[in-house]
Every structure is written in C-alpha cells, then in structure tokens.
Image (tube, rainbow, N blue to C red):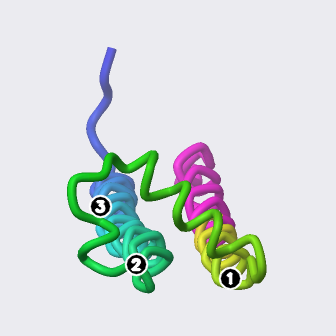
Amino acid sequence: MKTVQNPEHIEKIRQEVMRFRELLDVMKLRLELGDQLYTGLFAHLTEEEKQGKREKDLQTLVAYHLEEDQKPLEDAVLRMQFEARDFEKAFEELYGKIITPPLEED
C-alpha cells in the first residue's frame, strides 16, 4: 500500500525522467553524426557510379576504395565507439541514481 508521497523523492524521480529524455535527445544527435560519417565514406563516388545501384553494391565500391587506406572507416568507427562509451557511462550513472533508495527522514 502506498504511503504519503515525499515531495523531494518525487522531484528526484522527475529529474531522473528528465535526464533520461536528455540522454535520448543527445543520443539521436550522435546517431545522426554516425549516419553522416557513414555517408561520408561514399563521398568520393560520382553520381554516375551511384546511379541505380543497391546499397550493397555501393558498399562494395567503397570497399575497393578503402582497400588502400582504411583510415576513414577506422576514424568513423572509432568516433562512434567513443560516443557509445560516453552514453554507456551516462546511462550507468542514471541507473545508479534510480536504484539508490531515498534517504530516510528522522
């Protein structure tokens, strides 16, 4: 059975919900960055090379180009790995706050 609600505890939970929303919003932006990095791998292809090709075929063309120098792919993946770790840490911190029981009042 529920007891009388603690306003401070309710505010703490509200702030946790707000932080969750903030993390999701920032994560969307970072995912868009990842999409831009992915698209950038295809930047050297001409419109003629791209025309009428499936994505798998375009990826093959890019793979031929990257065979000599994989640095653009390495950089893109490394950047997103960093972004993912940053979010893993942020979600871990938020989860820790959520599962920490409120302090008992005397």
Packing grade of label 3 (10 A; few <14, some 14-19, many >=20) is: few
Given the image, on which type of amino acid does mark 3 rest?
A: Arg
Which residue is at a point 33% across and 81% down the rendered structure image? Answer: 46
Q: Which of label 3 and label 2 is nearer to you?
A: 2
Label 3, label 1: how far apart the Cα atoms are: 29 Å
- Residue to which mark 2 is pinned: 45
Q: Eyeballing the image, is 16 above or below 44?
A: above
Q: Answer yes or no: is residue 4 visible.
A: yes
Cβ atoms under marks 3 and 2 closer than 8 Å: no
Packing grade of label 1 (10 A; few <14, some 14-19, many >=20) is: few
Given the image, on which type of amino acid does mark 2 rest?
A: Leu
Is 30 in front, or is 39?
39
Q: Is residue 89 magenta?
A: yes
Quarter of the image where one finds residue 65: bottom right
- Residue to which mark 3 is pinned: 21
Q: Provide residue 86's location: percent of width, then percent of height.
A: 63, 72
Label 2, label 1: how far apart the Cα atoms are: 19 Å
Q: Provide residue 38's location: percent of width, then percent of height.
A: 46, 70
Which residue is at a point 26% across and 73% down the rendered structure image? Answer: 48
Q: For the image shown, how many numbered marks are present on the structure?
A: 3
Q: Which of label 2 and label 1 is nearer to you?
A: 2
Q: Provide residue 93's location: percent of width, then percent of height.
A: 63, 62
Is 104 in front, or is 27?
27
Is 51 in front, or is 104?
51
Work out which quarter of the rendered image holds the N terminus and state it.
top left
- Residue to which mark 1 is pinned: 75
Q: Which of label 3 and label 1 is nearer to you?
A: 1
Q: Provide residue 50's location: percent of width, then percent of height.
A: 30, 66
| Comes first in the chain, label 3 or label 1 | 3
Magenta range: 85-106
Work out which quarter of the rendered image holds the C terminus and state it.
bottom right
Q: Which mark is residue 20?
A: none
